Image: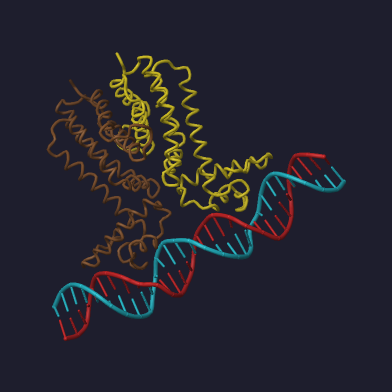
Chain colours: A brown, B yellow, C red, D cyan
Amino acid sequence: MENGIKIPTSRNGKATFKLLVESAITTFYKKGYSNTVIVDITKNAGVATGTFYLYFANKKSLYIYLLEYYQHEIRKAIAEKTANVEGFSKNQRIGIKTFFQYAIKHPEAYNIIWESLYIDKSLFKKYYHDFALRYQKGLDASIEKGEIKKIDSDILAYILMGISNFLGLKLILKMGNRNKLDYLVDQAMVLIDSCLIQE
Amino acid sequence: MENGIKIPTSRNGKATFKLLVESAITTFYKKGYSNTVIVDITKNAGVATGTFYLYFANKKSLYIYLLEYYQHEIRKAIAEKTANVEGFSKNQRIGIKTFFQYAIKHPEAYNIIWESLYIDKSLFKKYYHDFALRYQKGLDASIEKGEIKKIDSDILAYILMGISNFLGLKLILKMGNRNKLDYLVDQAMVLIDSCLIQE
DNA sequence: TCAAAATATGAATGACCGTTCATAAATAAA
DNA sequence: TTTATTTATGAACGGTCATTCATATTTTGA
């Protein structure tokens, strides 16, 4: 409510809410946030225009809802897959691979997340700052254990995010050659291991 | 003309053209491409609305002009600074440092370049694909000379672009701690050298 | 069973904006 | 000097879109 979102209580309301969210995801992906108009979302969802305002104060509220949704989903996917994995290298490998898999399955996620830079720069900063802090925690633990060399983990977090994000982009936009998921993961890990692993 | 741009011939025309371009840069940076309307650009440039259409077919033509302008400027800056530098490591260091310096001096460049993803995805692909191809050439030469290890230079180009871009972003958006230019360059080079240099 | 709350509709309002165009001033060419 | 070209103006047109609201239906809870 204060955040511009009204969560429905009834079964029908929940179904309509979900239709609107899913419609927004596909429309934002196809036309971009700015070129998407409210009727695009409602028409595609099969509801009347006014219904939109039952659940969302405006387009930006819905956008922020989506951004938080993807943040949560991506973290969950990586956390689940790496939960029982031991060691820095294997952890990184599974983490990066999961990130790539998520990007391939949800290519709209990239668009929606990066678009925050143009909707509200503070949302972009917050998204990657939060991600970096979590990454950093894991890195510090690995440094503590002596698994990897002692390197500024703040900077290292951004370096690793940069690698994953640009390779992920190359993968889903098919830029350059050799865009096989496993091959990209292997190549990235060869590099990461060779500069970080403490022998 | 065919590209939606009419280059003026007279001194006055050239001055007006420049005013419009500079106004567009600051307005796009402040409000984003989509939220910028033509009168924002003309008013800020101090000319009448119709004057815009003397030089640009529409907003997108002007945007593409800016994107090509920055592409050219950034390449030129890096090419000039690395022209007489010998060896992979020093070359990388100067290249990355020049990129950071450019980003600090022209923080609007990031916004304008990345926004292409939402204006016309093919522009974004082309921008980074071209950049990657140039990077790759240099990397292949270094591999040939035996300066660095034999690694897929297509992938390595995207990895290095990812590192520069995310650290550059951290730098200009002041995310995390320790955002001193030289410190970031040093840290990035410690990593890059340690995984690539052929001893 | 019945009043209150939640959900749904879509026409109407009012604001905004891209683009055109008739007109005119300045500059260049002859 | 005279004519053609370039440059400049800003009101006006036509279209789009966010948001509201009167009305109606469905669901919930007592």
Q: Residue at x 45, y 36 (%)?
A: B127
* A32 vs B163: above or below: below
Image quarter of the N terminus of chain B = top right
Above or below A13: residue A76? above
Numbered circles on residues, count? 0
Foreground residue among B72 and A108: A108
- Residue A10 in the image, given as x and y percentages of width and height: 21, 68
* Pick the front one: B185 or B120: B120
Residue B21, how many percent across, how many down?
56, 42
Across and down, in percent, residue B195 comes to: 28, 22
B184 and B57: which is toward the camera: B57
Residue at the spot 51% in from the left edge and 37% down from the top edge = B68
- Quarter of the image for residue A90 reads top left
Q: Quick check: D27 above or below A24?
A: below
Left or right: where A123 falls relative to B77: left
Quarter in which the C terminus of chain B is drawn: top left
Residue C26 percent coordinates (x, y): 73, 46
Left/right placement of residue A197 relative to residue B55 reads left
Residue nearer the viewer, B1 or A193: B1
Q: Is residue B95 above or below residue C21?
A: above
